[in-house]
Image (cartoon, rainbow, N blue to C red):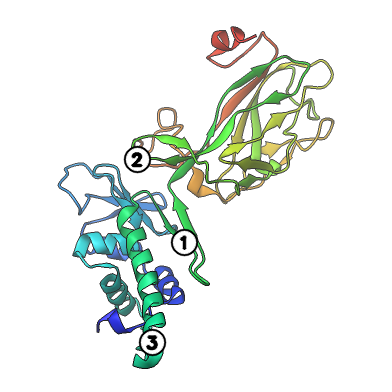
Amino acid sequence: MSLSHIQLTPQFVQAVREAVDIVEVAAGYTKLSRAGRKHRGLCPLHKEKTPSFHVDGELGFFKCFGCGAGGDAIKLHMLLTGDDFPAAMEALAQRFGVSLPAPSAAHRGARARVESERIENLAARTEVELADWITMRAVGNFRQLLAVFGRLLLRNALGPAATALPVPISVQSWQGSVFGTNTLDSCTAIPRSAIVLSGYQGTIAPGPNCNSYVQQNPVAFAAGVGTLTLAAPTGGTSGSVLLSPNLYSTAAGSYCAAAGSAPAAATAASMQYLLGRWNDLLDPDAIASTVYDDNPSARAAFGLYGSQPNNLIFQRENY
């Protein structure tokens, strides 16, 4: 059945998106093996000897680090079959059990036909043009859907022992060849309880109560840049601490809610989509060069002496 006489409504498009299993779609064209919570295999879109094609069944997206192709299940079907967007919608709807909309009546008039074409063209343009993220702009009740391949970045920080210490933190997205700040993200918020404090060096370590803590709760972001500040250590203490947001769904470690309080059990942020490849050399995976499964971390140091970040000399020159 052709979709040329069927209403390609936003509700129908969304229903197909939710029903499609991208792993099943990809597995019909290449052999996939599980790698953590994702799958990988040889890219079916170009010839290669080393697997660089990754499929995330939870998020419903694929990415090939060889040819650069990426998108959702509908985009993948279109690239693999050559179908245009309406044909892809019909094929996937029938395959995954989504009922096709009833044919539109001839007397609906030119206005209805124009509106239907507007939605089809919008969806088709979105699927064809965007490789690394997909967005569907609002048309009537058409909600915007945005998906970005990204990661959370922390950087080391150094400051005087007597003042609060800002720690650089940002959300990044893949921008074709490099990661850059995701200026579209003003929504991410990480609870203070999900930022694990560990690896203390110096007198700043809890003994037994906390001497410093993350002041913001939550750590919020504006245009991809977050605000995270460690309170100045109490009692004349100094030293450094390792900060690591727990982006997994399982809690581990401890955090500090306030100076003078005992460390408490940390919680989980459940933001696996912001995991990176930070610890591949220290904690190698079976495919360490490709799996994004590491929490970010950074060391924050109070005072000019003691155990400091590796870029200590550079930072001292900034004083």
| Mark 2 vs mark 1: in front | 1
| CA–CA distance in space, label 2 to label 3 | 43 Å
Going by the numbered disc 3, the residue's amino acid type is Gly
| CA–CA distance in space, label 2 to label 1 | 22 Å
Of residues 294 and 90, the one drawn nearer to the viewer in this rendering: 90
Earlier-in-chain disc, 2 versus 1: 1
Q: Position of residue 155 (x, y in %)?
A: 55, 26
Indicate the secondary structure of the residue bearing disc 1: loop
Indicate the secondary structure of the residue bearing disc 2: loop
| CA–CA distance in space, label 3 to label 1 | 25 Å
Of residues 276 and 3, the one drawn nearer to the viewer in this rendering: 3
Bin the neighbour count of mark 1 within 10 Å (Cα to Cα): few under 14, some 14-19, many 20 and up.
some
Q: Quadrant of residue 129?
A: bottom left
Q: Is residue 185 visible?
A: yes
Q: Position of residue 295 (x, y in %)?
A: 52, 38
Q: Quadrant of residue 116?
A: bottom left
Q: Which residue is mark 3?
A: 109
Please report the residue visible at 39 percent of the width from the left and 70 percent of the height from the top: 119
Earlier-in-chain disc, 3 versus 1: 3
Bin the neighbour count of mark 3 within 10 Å (Cα to Cα): few under 14, some 14-19, many 20 and up.
few
Going by the numbered disc 2, the residue's amino acid type is Gly
Please report the residue visible at 55 percent of the width from the left and 49 percent of the height from the top: 271
- The C terminus: image quadrant: top right
Q: Position of residue 123 (x, y in %)?
A: 37, 65
Going by the numbered disc 1, the residue's amino acid type is Arg
Using the image, tell me which numbered label, if any, was put on residue 176: 2
Of residues 91 and 48, the one drawn nearer to the viewer in this rendering: 91
